[in-house]
Image (spheres, rainbow, N blue to C red):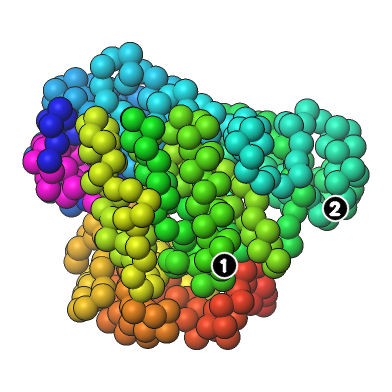
Amino acid sequence: MLRKIKRVLVANRGEIAVRAIRAVRELGGESVAVFSEGDKNSIHKDLADFSVCIGPAPSSKSYLSIPSILSAIDLTNADAVYPGYGFLAENSHFASICERSNIKFIGPSSKTLSLTGDKAAARQAAIEAQVPIISGSPPVEDVKEALEFASKIGYPVLLKAAAGGGGRGMRVAHNEQEMVRLLPVAQREAEASFGDKRVYIEKYILNPKHIEIQILADEYGNVIYVSDRECSIQRRHQKLLEEAPSPFITEEVRKKMGEAAVRFAKHVGFTGAGTVEFLVDKDMNFYFIEMNGRIQVEHPVSEMITGVDLVSWQLRIADGQKLGIRQSDITVDGHAIEFRINVEDPETFAPSPGTITKLFLPGGYGVRVDTHIYQGYTIPPFYDSLIAKLIVWGKTREEAIERGKRALKEFIVEGVKTTIPFHLRTLEHPQFLSRKYDTSLVDKEFLKTR
């Protein structure tokens, strides 16, 4: 139960807002939902104890508006704010204001967020923590500097936004001509997405696996890793399906990655629930990518195989409680897969907002659905296309796959197009079934004729 925190304002929307409201209530606290005019029919505002409209539909005028969020906190006398993922979740400026205003930001300190949010600074921290990194550069100023560095490490190279995430501001250059063309594109996208045009260069690892380690850390120096997750089913660096544990890495590599993630988290003074992300090559060498100082969309797969309620622990850690779990307490039972159900054309991935005219959610043993949608709900076109997360569990990976097929076929959403057919195709793909897939699978196999 919560001891110090009494009322939590959930500064987010959609399924993660519902998830947070439930966790707050289970811990004996009160919740405040915020919503934009575009979300006036969203269910999260009805589930909370209190709700406040914070502005027009565009995110910049509502969910990303720090003055609006602070006003809602003041109006409702909330003593903590839960940012979820996206929006202000990793905004160090917002976290700093909360600290100065005696509002508990449920996440790491503003100092830690500043460091982990700057990919160039995070790379340096990884070096200091003796965590393997990919050969890379400091932020480059111009094409000449970029060409000089790329010639030293060899093509192909990856251009990455220093303040980025979610695949934005990323481009692969295979030669000098592409570097000249793509660097300005990456810089413009980085500035538009993050207000920071800095871009750095990394050696591009061909066909890697994308594997991340879930971290929990309290304010007393206790840090553990809570399983790994395989996130290699992606479209243009955007995750679509995740599973845990990774079906690729060995137990020895899993342990080394977990220990490296803990070293990094301790080095940067991390507290709360976060994720350290790695790329893994075909020889199982792993390399640090970044740390996300927030809950991840895919956190339920870790919860399903370990029985650890990550959102509950986020809240309890922010409440000043000690982490009541030791590393030896973490055991993995079975296998879990999460399917991101997006309102998108399953062939082209083009957005498909609209009104849900019929809805049936799957259930049964080993099936979980995190969502905010309901029959008759009109999906607003202003936000992310994620409408639900279907998570399935099985004693084995094969059982989880079969349960996933059954649950996906039960998942009825009419009135809009969704990515359910894509997920069913993925579960039948030979590379997925053989566990040999990597981050190139979707772009090569599913989009190669489009």
Q: Position of residue 334 (x, y in %)?
A: 36, 74
Count of marks overlaid on the render? 2
Image point (61%, 47%), residue name: 289
Residue at the limit of the structure toward the top, as seen here: 100
Image point (27%, 32%), residue name: 318
Q: Position of residue 175 (x, y in %)?
A: 87, 52
Image point (73%, 57%), residue name: 205
Q: Which residue is mark 1?
A: 249
Q: Earlier in the sequence, mark 1 or mark 2?
A: 2
Is 202 magenta? The answer is no
Q: What is the span of residues highlighted in magenta in the rendered image? A: 19-40
Q: Amino acid at mark 2?
A: Tyr
What crowding class fits label 2: few (fewer than 14 Cα within 10 Å), some (14-19), or many (20 or more)? Answer: some
Q: Which residue is mark 2?
A: 155
Image point (33%, 52%), residue name: 380
Is any part of residue 86 visible from this angle? Answer: no
Q: Position of residue 183 (x, y in %)?
A: 77, 41
Is 38 magenta? The answer is yes
Q: Please tell me whether mark 1 sits on a helix, a strand or a loop.
A: loop
Front residue of 332/16: it is: 332
Front residue of 71/124: it is: 124
Whether tag 1 and tag 2 are in contact, CB under 8 A, the answer is no
In the depicted structure, whether residue 133 falls above or below residue 206 = above
